[in-house]
Image (cartoon, helix red, strand yellow):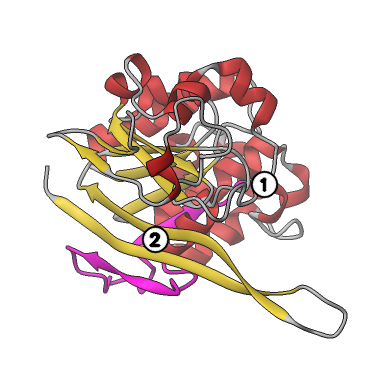
Amino acid sequence: MNKLLELNNISYSVNKRTTPLGKESVHLILKDISLEIYDGEILGIVGESGCGKTTLAKIIADIIQPSSGVITKYFNFNTNNGANPIQLLFQNSDELINPFRKVKSMLNEIDKVQDNAGILTEVGLSTELIDKLGFQLSGGERQRVGLARILLAHPRVLILDEPFAAQDISSKEKFLQLLTKLKTQLGMTIICISHEIDLLNRLADRIAVMFNGKIIEISPTQNLLHLPMHPYSKYLISASNYELNRNKIITNENSSAACSYFARCEVKKDICLSEVNLFENKETKVYCNNP
C-alpha cells in the first residue's frame, strides 16, 4: 500500500504548574513517535487511558501542533469544500452535536443540499431523525449523526476515538459493517482508537500499541493478537487485564529508565535503564530489548 501520512519523531508537551508560587515543569505527553499510515487501511490504536492516544489523534487531525517532529502528508491537503481532509470523531457523544439544533440544520451546514436525509441511512439511522433536535437523540444516535456530518465533508482520513463506547451489541455490529463498507467501497483510510481488541480483530489491518506516550509495538492485527512481542502487548491483549486497567491514568513510572514500561516489566534487563532497541522486520516494529 502507498503511504498516506508519515509521522517522524512526534513529541508533545505542556507546561504544568507544580507549586502555589507558579513554578512550572514540562509534562511530556507524547514521546518521539514515528508512524506510517497507509492509503486505504484501517489502523487500530490501543493502550490504557492516559497513554496519549487522543492527543496523537488530535495531532494527526491538525487540531493541535506537535512540540517537535514532522508530519508528512502524501496527498493534497486543500479540498474543494474547505474542510479538513482528516476528520476526527470524538468519543464524548454529548459534545458531538448542538442539542438545540435540528439534525437537518446540522447536516445542511456541511452540505447545502436541501435533503441530506440519505446520509442518515448510510450510517444506519432512520431518516425520521432528520427533524429531531440534538437533545432528543440517544448517545449512539448522536454519535452517528456526528459521523454523518463528517462523511458529508468527504474526508480522506477518518479518525474514530472509542467509537463503540456508547453502543449496545447490535449497534456495535452494525457500526463494524459500516466501517468495513467505508473502507471497501469508498477506499477511506480509518484510524480507530478502541479498548475493544476483539472488535479491532475483525476490523483493523494493523494495530499500534501505546504505553505512556510511546508506540511500543505495531504489527498486522493477526500477528499482534496471536504472537505479541512486547511484554506490555502480551499483557494488554488479555481482555480481563485490559478491562481492569484501561481507566488507570498512566504516569511516568520510572522517569530514569529509557524504557517507560521498566517498572512493570517481568523480563527487564539492566540495559533497559539506558536504552531501548528497535526490533524490526518486514511487517512488525517492536521497541524492546527483549521481545
Region of the chain picked out in magenta, as a range: 62-91
Residue 92 horizontal/vertical position (percent)? 67, 48
Q: How many marks?
A: 2
What residue is rendered at 50% in x and 52% in y? 213
Mark 2: secondary structure: helix
Mark 1: secondary structure: helix
Image position of 40 (left or right of 62) = left
Q: Which residue is mark 1?
A: 93
What residue is rendered at 24% in x and 57% in y? 5
**CA neighbours of label 1 inside 10 A, class few (<14), some (14 to 19), many (20+):** many
Residue 218 seen anywhere in this rendered image of the structure = yes
- Which of 49 and 276 lies nearest the eye of the viewer? 276
Disc 1 to disc 2, how far (Cα)?
Answer: 21 Å
Residue 154 seen anywhere in this rendered image of the structure = no
Image position of 193 (left or right of 275) = right
Name the amino acid type tagged 1. Ser
Name the amino acid type tagged 2. Ile
Q: Residue furthest right?
A: 20
- Which of 101 and 200 lies nearest the eye of the viewer? 200
**The stretch drawn in magenta includes residue 218:** no
Q: Quadrant of residue 126?
A: top right
- Which of 261 and 103 lies nearest the eye of the viewer? 261
Q: Which residue is mark 2?
A: 60
Residue 45 horizontal/vertical position (percent)? 43, 39
Residue 53 horizontal/vertical position (percent)? 51, 49
Image position of 180 (left or right of 174) = left
Q: Earlier in the sequence, mark 1 or mark 2?
A: 2
What residue is rendered at 63% in x and 33% in y? 165
Q: Residue furthest front?
A: 270
Q: Is residue 101 above or below residue 39?
A: below
Q: Is residue 116 above or below residue 186?
A: below
